């Protein structure tokens, strides 16, 4: 009888020992967790006890801690990026603002003909400032995680044609005759029409601002993908670092004096990626290429209905 009582007392003491040890371990884990939540440290939670599920608990807590650190790091990087964006753009805005002030002063003593010329220049500078601010707004909007780009089936042929036609007057005024190659087949994708148009505009505008008077636009399908290639000639291709052209504020040396935000291709890249596409740049001789591809969506339509509509249009 005394033997069993001794065994029972031993078991009780052993359980008490483990309960006290587990309680201490839990308090220690809580202290470590509180410290890590308050301080910026690379430390992880540790536990002396490996039994009773503590090893799994510590592993899960460390995963949560590392996830929180990653979120904080990404938030700080994004915050710093936006701050740098405003700083850089405010510097770029000073140039057109300074020139505006100069032209307004010149107008005070200018003749009627000179005032007309100065007003035209002032309007161009104001338009340049407007474009810079619009690019800044769009860039910060795209970098906001809460911004959702709604995707739906759209015809890239139609969007590309409309975008190209919108530049007709600009091209004519500059004596540019673009080489455009579009397929007869209608190509469809899951995209956002406004976002796709904005991305295309930025790529084309980049070619007009920083290239020579030659632009090529090619649209075709390849291996179940829609490929859109846009090319412009450049004077000094050796000055362009294609690995950096999609970075915000990147400008090749020959383009430093241009009135551009330096965000155009960054915004185009963001739109392409949000539509599950790919984008990269290449230099071939004196030609600068921006090559974009999207997954193609096969659209099945009623062929009889299509024939009826086609016949009615031709009549």
Image: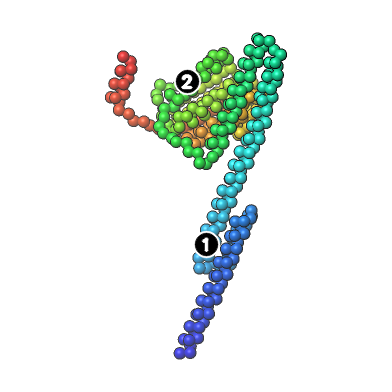
Name the mark nearer the viewer: 1 or 2. 1
| Image location of residue 211, percent across then percent down | 60, 21
Q: Is residue 203 left or right of residue 161?
A: right
Q: Is residue 286 visible?
A: no
| Image location of residue 219, percent across then percent down | 47, 24
In the picture of the structure, the residue carrying the numbered disc 2 is 181
Task: Name the residue: 56% across, 29% down.
Answer: 134
Colour scheme employed for the rendering of this structure: rainbow
Residue toward you, 218 or 167: 167
Q: Residues within 10 Å of mark 1 (few under 14, many from 20)?
A: some
* Quadrant occupied by the C terminus: top left
Q: Is residue 81 above or below residue 24?
A: above
Q: CA distance from mark 1 to mark 2?
A: 61 Å
Q: Is residue 183 left or right of residue 170?
A: left
Q: Secondary structure at mark 1?
A: helix
Q: Residues within 10 Å of mark 2 (few under 14, many from 20)?
A: few
Numbered marks: total: 2
| Image location of residue 2, percent across then percent down | 48, 89
Task: Name the residue: 55% across, 33% down.
Answer: 138
Tell me the quarter of the picture where residue 75 sits: top right
Residue toward you, 3 or 175: 175
* Quadrant occupied by the N terminus: bottom left
Task: Name the residue: 29% across, 21% down.
Answer: 308
Q: Is residue 39 above or below residue 298?
A: below
In the picture of the structure, the residue carrying the numbered disc 1 is 57
Q: Earlier in the sequence, mark 1 or mark 2?
A: 1
């Amino acid at each position: 009888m005394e033997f069993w009582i001794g065994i029972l007392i031993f078991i009780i003491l052993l359980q008490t020992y483990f309960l006290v040890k587990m309680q201490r371990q839990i308090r220690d884990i809580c202290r470590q967790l509180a410290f890590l939540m308050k301080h910026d440290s690379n430390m992880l939670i540790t536990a002396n006890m490996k039994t009773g599920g503590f090893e799994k608990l510590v592993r899960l807590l460390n995963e949560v801690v590392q996830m929180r650190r990653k979120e904080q790091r990404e938030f700080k990087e994004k915050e710093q990026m936006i701050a740098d964006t405003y700083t850089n753009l405010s510097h770029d805005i000073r140039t057109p603002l300074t020139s505006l002030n100069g032209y307004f002063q010149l107008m005070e003593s200018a003749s009627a003909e000179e005032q007309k010329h100065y007003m035209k220049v002032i309007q161009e500078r104001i338009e340049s400032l407007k474009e810079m601010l619009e690019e800044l707004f769009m860039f910060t909007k795209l970098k906001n995680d809460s911004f959702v780009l709604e995707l739906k089936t759209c015809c890239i042929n139609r969007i590309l044609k409309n975008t190209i036609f919108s530049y007709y007057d600009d091209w004519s005024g500059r004596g540019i005759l673009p080489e455009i190659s579009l397929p007869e087949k209608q190509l469809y994708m899951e995209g956002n029409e406004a976002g796709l148009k904005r991305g295309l505009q930025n790529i084309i505008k980049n070619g007009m601002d920083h290239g020579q008077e030659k632009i090529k636009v090619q649209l075709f399908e390849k291996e179940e993908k829609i490929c859109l290639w846009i090319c412009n000639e450049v004077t000094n291709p050796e000055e362009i670092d294609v690995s950096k052209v999609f970075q915000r504020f990147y400008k090749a040396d020959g383009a430093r004096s241009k009135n551009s935000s330096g965000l155009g291709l960054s915004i185009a890249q963001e739109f392409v990626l949000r539509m599950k596409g790919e984008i990269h740049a290449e230099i071939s001789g004196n030609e600068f290429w921006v090559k974009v591809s999207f997954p193609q969506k096969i659209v099945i339509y009623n062929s009889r209905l299509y024939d009826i509509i086609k016949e009615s249009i031709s009549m």
